[in-house]
């Protein structure tokens, strides 16, 4: 399970300084998929009261490898996982300048069956001085955040018989209780797997269902910690330390050729689940004992394809509909009441996008690389001017840390100052 040195290469790094690097916790860090709480909400700071006409200042922009894996920020460093040639590459950059601190790479042979982007899909997670990644080919790795050394490696296709699926492996890792958790879809009870963060040893495995493309989230209910997964056909809650299944609730697409990629959205004891390909949307209430109880279900209220919705003051804001090029009807931004599923408004001018909540505003990054903001209000959609910060295929969820937005397209990583104008 440990990776022999011949399997990886570390680029330029100051190894002496690496020994002293402890990755201090910073309140404004964005160390994992969709932020510190994995809810797409930036709770530290607000946007500038007003942006100039030509948009906020771009602090730096760098060329990067391929992939849909989003950037993460911790301890003054921005980490990005991408594909360059026949290697999956993890880089650490100075968050303020974009300067590469170190670059590390391991080989990959992943090829997309449909000719899409060959890069990693899953966003890294930074915890315990390590960076955890999942490659598009199903390889789980733990890297030293200090210098990029590979600490351990696990090939889920070879070891667990995990299926490649339609578009490779895409579960963004979640660290809980000294374990890093993945929905891998392995055989013989290895659908969901927990690895020890320090050694890579499998701590537990459970379920025999295929993996979805959704990332798990964690929540505390009745004083007990739970990790929530969307597998191929179920919403599942487990104890992170043991893997004991607390409940399973049927939810998933009705079509075989499909993708369920949005994460569960948790609001107290309510959970919003959403997907395309016939999955639709539903809200369930999780009682103190027993399985979830359906509050409402609607096939058309808010079908999240790839991007997960955000929540504020009783309402969900997210992209409804499939985001495939040429899909009809096309994707649209919606505001939906959480407790009823009632659509308060929708707008068809946004297109495919990721939505992040900063203060009381929606920060919207479209797949075409346009950035703009709008009040998160059920009274209507009042967007500001759009500014182009990236090229096409800006599909990855962005990161926000210390007043800066970090976002990527298919070949660029950009840092934008959200507080000050040009």
Image: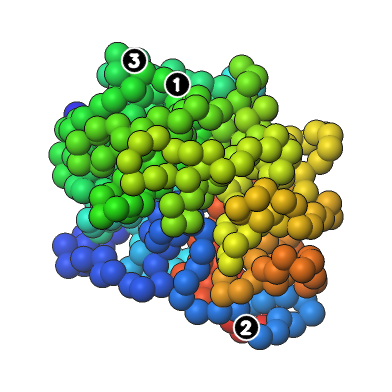
Residue under label 3:
187
Q: Considering only order in the chain, which callout, 2 or 3, is on the residue closer to the N terminus?
A: 2
Quadrant of the drawing holding the N terminus: top left
Q: Nearer the viewer, residue 321 or 311?
A: 311
**Can residue 171 be seen in the rendering of this structure?**
no
| Helix, strand or loop status at disc 3 | loop
**Can residue 196 be seen in the rendering of this structure?**
yes
What's the distance in space between the residues labelled 1 and 3, CA to CA?
9 Å
Of marks 1 and 2, the one in the foreground: 1
| Place of residue 360 in the rendered image (x, y in percent of width and height, measured from the top left) | 61, 74
| Place of residue 340 in the rendered image (x, y in percent of width and height, measured from the top left) | 65, 50
Residue 210: mark in rendering: 1
Residue 48: mark in rendering: 2
What's the distance in space between the residues labelled 1 and 2, CA to CA?
44 Å
Contact between labelled residues 2 and 1, with CB atoms less than 8 Å apart = no
**Left or right for 132, reference 363:** left
Label 2 Cα crowd, 10 Å radius (few <14 / some 14-19 / many 20+): some
Q: Nearer the viewer, residue 337 or 325?
A: 337
| Place of residue 119 in the rendered image (x, y in percent of width and height, measured from the top left) | 52, 37
Is 38 drawn above or below residue 288 in the view shown?
Answer: below
Q: Which of 319 and 340 is in front in this view?
A: 340
The residue positioned 47% from the left and 45% from the top of the image is: 285
Q: Considering only order in the chain, which callout, 2 or 1, is on the residue closer to the N terminus?
A: 2
The residue positioned 42% from the left and 44% from the top of the image is: 286
Residue 138: mark in rendering: none
**Left or right for 108, reference 47:** left
């Amino acid at each position: 399970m440990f990776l022999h040195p011949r399997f990886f290469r570390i680029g330029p790094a100051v190894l002496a300084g690496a020994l002293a690097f402890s990755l201090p916790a910073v309140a404004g860090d964005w160390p994992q998929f969709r932020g510190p709480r994995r809810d797409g909400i930036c709770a530290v700071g607000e946007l500038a009261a007003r942006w100039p006409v030509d948009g906020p200042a771009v602090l730096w922009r760098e060329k990067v490898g391929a992939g849909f894996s989003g950037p993460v920020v911790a301890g003054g460093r921005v980490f990005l996982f991408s594909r360059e040639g026949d290697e999956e590459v993890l880089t650490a950059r100075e968050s303020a300048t974009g300067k590469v601190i170190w670059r590390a790479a391991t080989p990959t042979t992943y090829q997309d069956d449909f000719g899409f982007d060959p890069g990693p899909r899953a966003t890294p997670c930074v915890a315990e001085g390590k960076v955890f990644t999942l490659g598009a080919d199903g390889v789980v790795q733990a890297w030293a955040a200090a210098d990029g050394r590979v600490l351990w490696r696990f090939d889920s296709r070879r070891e667990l018989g995990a299926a490649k699926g339609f578009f490779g492996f895409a579960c963004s890792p979640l660290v809980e209780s000294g374990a890093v958790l993945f929905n891998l879809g392995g055989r013989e009870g290895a659908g969901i797997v927990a690895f020890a963060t320090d050694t890579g040893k499998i701590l537990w495995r459970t379920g025999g269902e295929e993996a979805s493309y959704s990332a798990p989230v964690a929540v505390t209910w009745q004083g007990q910690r739970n990790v929530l997964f969307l597998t191929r056909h179920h919403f599942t809650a487990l104890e992170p330390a043991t893997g004991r299944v607390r409940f399973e609730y049927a939810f998933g697409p009705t079509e075989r050729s499909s993708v369920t990629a949005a994460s569960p959205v948790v609001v107290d004891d309510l959970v919003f689940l959403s997907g395309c390909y016939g999955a639709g949307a539903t809200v369930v209430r999780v009682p103190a004992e027993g399985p979830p109880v359906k509050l409402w279900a609607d096939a058309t209220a808010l079908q999240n394809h790839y991007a997960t919705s955000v929540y504020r003051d009783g309402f969900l804001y997210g992209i409804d509909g499939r985001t495939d090029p040429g899909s009809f009807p096309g994707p649209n931004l919606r505001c939906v009441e959480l407790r009823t599923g009632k659509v308060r408004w929708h707008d068809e001018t946004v297109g495919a996008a990721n939505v992040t909540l900063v203060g009381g505003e929606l920060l919207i990054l479209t797949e075409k690389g346009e950035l703009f903001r709008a009040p998160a209000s059920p009274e209507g959609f009042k967007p500001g001017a759009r500014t182009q910060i990236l090229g096409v295929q800006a599909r990855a969820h962005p990161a926000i840390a210390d007043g800066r937005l970090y976002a990527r397209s298919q070949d660029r990583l950009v840092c934008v100052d959200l507080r000050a104008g040009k």
